[in-house]
Image (cartoon, rainbow, N blue to C red):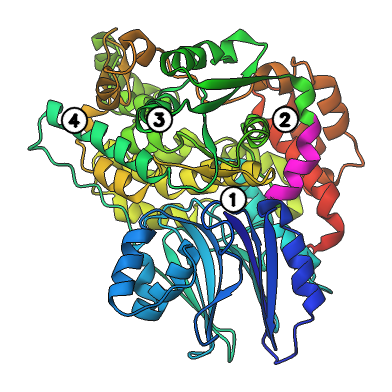
Amino acid sequence: MCGIVGLINGNGMLVNPDVIMRMTNAIIHRGPTDGGTIVHGSIALGNRRLAIIDLEGGMQPLCNEDGKIWITYNGEIYNFLKIKQELVEKGHQFKTISDTEMVVHAYEEWGVKCVEQFRGMFAFAILDHRKNQIFLARDQLGIKPLYYLENPGIFAFSSEIEAFHTIPDLRLTIDLEAIDQYFWIQYIPAPKSIFREIKKLPPANRMIVNLDDLSLKAEEYWNLEFEPDIHICEQEWIEAIDFEIRESVRAHLISDVPFGAFLSGGIDSSAVVAYMSQILNKPVRTFSIGFEEKEFNELAYAKVVSDRWKTEHKVQIIRPDALGILPALVKHYGEPFGDSSAIPTYYVSQLAQENVPMVLSGDGGDESFGGYNSYVEWMRRLDGRGTPIWKRILRPVASFFLPVRYPPMKASLENWLHFIQYLNKDQRNSLWRKEYKYVIQGKLEMFNREYEKAKTYSRLSTVQYMDIKTYLPYDILTKVDIASMMHGLEVRTPLVDIRVMEFAAKIPPYHLIKPNINNIWSGKQIVKKALEKYYPIEFLNRPKMGFSIPAVKWFSSEGILSEYIFDRILNPRSHLFEFFNFDAVQNLMAMKDFRSSWFFLFLDEWLNQNYQRFIIN
């Protein structure tokens, strides 16, 4: 696992070696093992490496035999040994045992199509002197990040936004539309970032940068398709799920260093630990975060798993003073990020890194197997599931007379966005000052584009697909990548795996969401049945909690930290009020919903750290 950077001067001006070194050092936390840079005239690459495979031979940037092709690479390719063997049979010679060198030879053999063979997490750049181009690519599901910057006469890329700020005389423009999207859906989706000049390369995308004129050509090389197979019976699906998840966990365990697992106590992390414990011949090291507030504490469930598999278990209790890490979080995320579970992710990563350099996590199971409460509620609202018959009969009649109170619920993108949004359009309209109301969005470009691909799927598969293309890479995986790499910890996600997700997309929706043993509609039912051989039914069918902090008790108007937060956010000197109406901010802060407080707090800190770095245009 690594961090990558690169800088190209389009006017032929030589790159100052100090500049690429500063860019590389800005992400040193991502690769504490070693680092390197190369400068070829107007082109420079940098890399910081966290050594997991081939501890001695995997230093970067790395080149091919004749020095015409160079790579800076971040990730792990789990099928690299198979691909390497095929390349050896084709005549390629290897000098290391790292997957990095395999990528170089795969590019030599298949060109940009090489990524179509990779199973893993990756973001890399290949400098090809033969074709006078740079080839950038990102993994199919967006596990590893890749940002790029276009400025007159300059192209740059990095694993984190912070590295761009080390480029001399760089002046960036704040994208206020991106801030509006942040308040709408709690993150900024591709291609946008907080700066107009910086963009995100979407998952499953590859890009060619022509070094003659710095022109870009990007394309999507893979997409997930939901094609349910109705000919397979439930028992066959149960056996197949058991096999596929076990195989994925096994593939993700390839390593030359010790490793462990995040254990929240939820279904997905408990499944990963179960399979790890059966595959390995020694106890798994597990790490959990808990809270003093019992209703947010899953430590009792994590203990059930730890006791069941006799893991070496470590626990840390998080208290409200954990908010002291806010400046560090804001610096590394590089732009407003509204998911407050970044806090426990930071602390569980810190706890794990004190013991091992790499862990497995259970992220992705909810998207693949229909586990989110939002999916259950979405289906319930569409079909009236769980609603008394008399309400189902009266609701259409009531909606005729009271259309605002009883809106018809149809499976549309507009309704899904309304379903998942944080601040609605009216709230955002009241928030922005008059001169900035033009930034308020009615549509989200990426959401519209992806919905067009998915609208023929079932109602459940459509929203699963939407989450896999949006929420998963730009919230969940971004959160985990940044919070873990702040500590130089590699996190692998066997449930966010191309084979697992392509398999899960074949499971008919009626196997995923249906009544459980308590006759309560819930998700992930077929997975829970597959796990019954490992855990009690009561453990598997308890209400879903999610990995979050006691945010209402900490951040809301009646929370423990309310005085500190209100004093800070409602300070008239805050940069927030250059963009927002004071009364609207105050009204949102007064709500018991904690989310507005966290959104404003994160943005306020970001503005404090970055105000001198951008212009408003």
| Residue hosting label 2 | 597
| Residue hosting label 3 | 281
At label 1, the amino acid type is: Ile
Residue 260 x, y percent position in the rendering: 52, 33
Question: Which of the two discs, 2 and 3, sits closer to the camera?
Answer: 3
At label 2, the amino acid type is: Ser
| Residue hosting label 1 | 188
Q: Name the residue at the right extreme.
A: 573
Question: Which of the two discs, 2 and 4, sits closer to the camera?
Answer: 4
Residue 136 x, y percent position in the rendering: 51, 71
Which of the two discs, 2 and 3, labels the residue nearer the N terminus?
Answer: 3
SS for dot 2: helix
Rounded to the nearest angstrom, the CA distance separating label 2 from label 3 is 47 Å
Q: Can you tell which mark lies on residue 349?
A: none
Which of the two discs, 2 and 1, labels the residue nearer the N terminus?
Answer: 1
Q: Nearer the viewer, residue 222 or 287?
A: 287
**Numbered marks: total:** 4
Rounded to the nearest angstrom, the CA distance separating label 4 from label 3 is 23 Å
Point 66% across, 22% down: residue: 551
Q: Name the residue at the left extreme.
A: 231
Rounded to the nearest angstrom, the CA distance separating label 2 from label 1 is 18 Å
In magenta, the rendered stretch is 324-333
Rounded to the nearest angstrom, the CA distance separating label 2 from label 4 is 45 Å
Left-right relation of 358 to 601: left
The reply to whether discs 4 and 3 touch (Cβ–Cβ < 8 Å) is no
Point 40% across, 80% down: residue: 108
